[in-house]
Amino acid sequence: MSEIGIGVIGGGYMGKAHSVAMASVGAVFNTALRPRLEMIAASSAESAERYRAAFGFHRATGDWKELVADDRVDAIVIATPQNMHRDIAQAAFALGKPVMCEKPMGASLADAKAMVAAAQGHINMVGYNYIRTPAAQYARQLIGDGVIGDVTFFKGENAEDFLADPALPVTWRTDGIANGCIGDLAPHLFNMALALMGPIDRVMADMETVHKSRPGGTVTNDDQVQMMCRFSNGAMGHLFSSRVATGRKMGYAYEIFGTKGAIRFDQEDQNALWLYKMEGPEAQRGFTKILTGPAHPDYEPFCLGPGHGTGYQDQIIIEAKDFLTAIHTGQNIWPTFADGLSVIQVTDAALRSADSGTWADVHTS
C-alpha cells in the first residue's frame, strides 16, 4: 500500500465531489494507492484556503501552475471551467503526471484533440460519472452478452430543469456555446450512447433557445437539442437533451430495444434497471425491475444489502478507484481522453447539422 499525493484544481461543485471521493476511496475499495489530499487550487488564495480547510487538504494555492509543478503532487484532478482544461492538462502531462479531467474535456474540438495528443503515453481519464453506476455497468454487460439480442433502436435523454424558470438571470451558463445545453449537458448523453451502443456514424440535429432573454441580458447559447442518429452497428437512435425540461431533475434515461428483449433506465431511480426478455408465454411477459445489489459491478464495496442503493457521490468514488487503479497498473481505464474526444466529435457533428439543416457525418480523424 502506497501513498499518492493528489492535487485538485477547482473547489466548486465538482471540486468538492472529487475531493470527498479521494478522501474516501481507499477505505471503500481498499485501493493499492491511498490518496493524500496534498493541495487544492482555486481562483484566489482566499477561496483555495477555504476549500483546503473544508475538504482536508494539506496546502492551498491561488495559482494552478504552482499545484501542477509541486513535487508532492503526484496526480491531478481538473475540476475547472472548460476553457482551462487544455492548458492544465498539457502542463501536467509535460511533467509526466496522471490527469483526470472533468467532462466535457476542453471548450472546443481543437482543445480536445490537443489534449489527446498531449496524453499519449500518460495515464488519463475523463470524468463521465453517470455511466459508472452499478446499473449502467450491468446494462453494458447485458448488451455485450447478447441478452436482448441485436439492438435495433436506442432512445436516450439527459433532461433537467435548472433553467426552466425564465425569471432566472443570465449567468456564465447562458453565455457561449461551450456552456450551453449541447456543450455542458448533452455530453453526458453522447457518452451514454457511445458507451452502450458504440460509435455514431451520422446525426441530424436541431437546437433551440427557449428563453432568449433573461434578467440581466441576452442568452447566447442553446437550451435544448434533439437529434436522430445512426450508429455504426446499424441501429437507429434518437437523443434529446434539455436544461429547461420542467419537472425533470436528473432525467438521464434510456430505452434500448433488441431482437430478444429491451432495457430501460432512469437516473432518478438510479438503483433500478428494467429488463424485458422475449421468452415464455405471452401472458407472463413484462419488464422485470432489477434492484442493484452486491451481484452488480462496484456495488458491494459500498453496501452488502441488495436494494439499499448507491448515490451520486458513490459514482465519483468509483471514478477515483478507476483512476488510482490505472495509475497503479500503468494501464489506462475507460473512459480515456480519446473517449472524451469521441464525445466532442459527436457534438461537433451536431453543431454542423443544426447549422446546415442536413445530416452530418461524425468525423473521427
Image (cartoon, grey):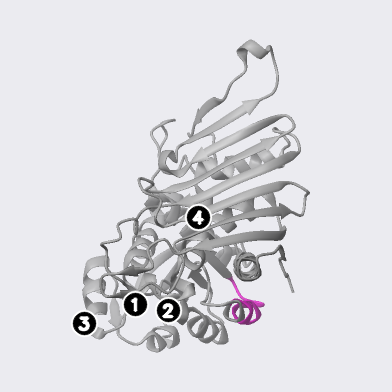
Q: Main secondary structure of the magenta part?
A: helix
Earlier-in-chain disc, 2 versus 1: 1
Q: Label 4, on which residue? A: 241
Q: Which mark is residue 312?
A: none
Q: Are marks 2 and 1 in contact (CB under 8 Å)?
A: yes
Q: Is-magenta flag for residue 119?
A: yes
Q: Nearer the viewer, residue 33 or 63?
A: 63
Q: Are marks 4 and 3 in contact (CB under 8 Å)?
A: no
How far apart marks 2 and 3 lie (CA) works out to 20 Å
Q: Label 2, on which residue? A: 73
Question: Vertically, is 31 above or below 278?
Answer: below
Q: Are marks 2 and 3 in contact (CB under 8 Å)?
A: no
Give the SS element for disc 3.
helix
Residue 334 seen from this side: no
- To which quarter of the image does residue 149 belong? top right
How far apart marks 2 and 1 lie (CA) works out to 7 Å
Residue at (26% x, 70% y) in the render: 215
Residue 301 seen from this side: yes
Q: Which mark is residue 46?
A: 3
**315 sits to left or right of 204:** left
Q: Label 1, on which residue? A: 39
Q: Nearer the viewer, mark 2 or mark 4?
A: 4
Earlier-in-chain disc, 2 versus 3: 3
Q: Nearer the viewer, mark 1 or mark 4?
A: 4
Earlier-in-chain disc, 1 versus 4: 1
Earlier-in-chain disc, 2 versus 4: 2
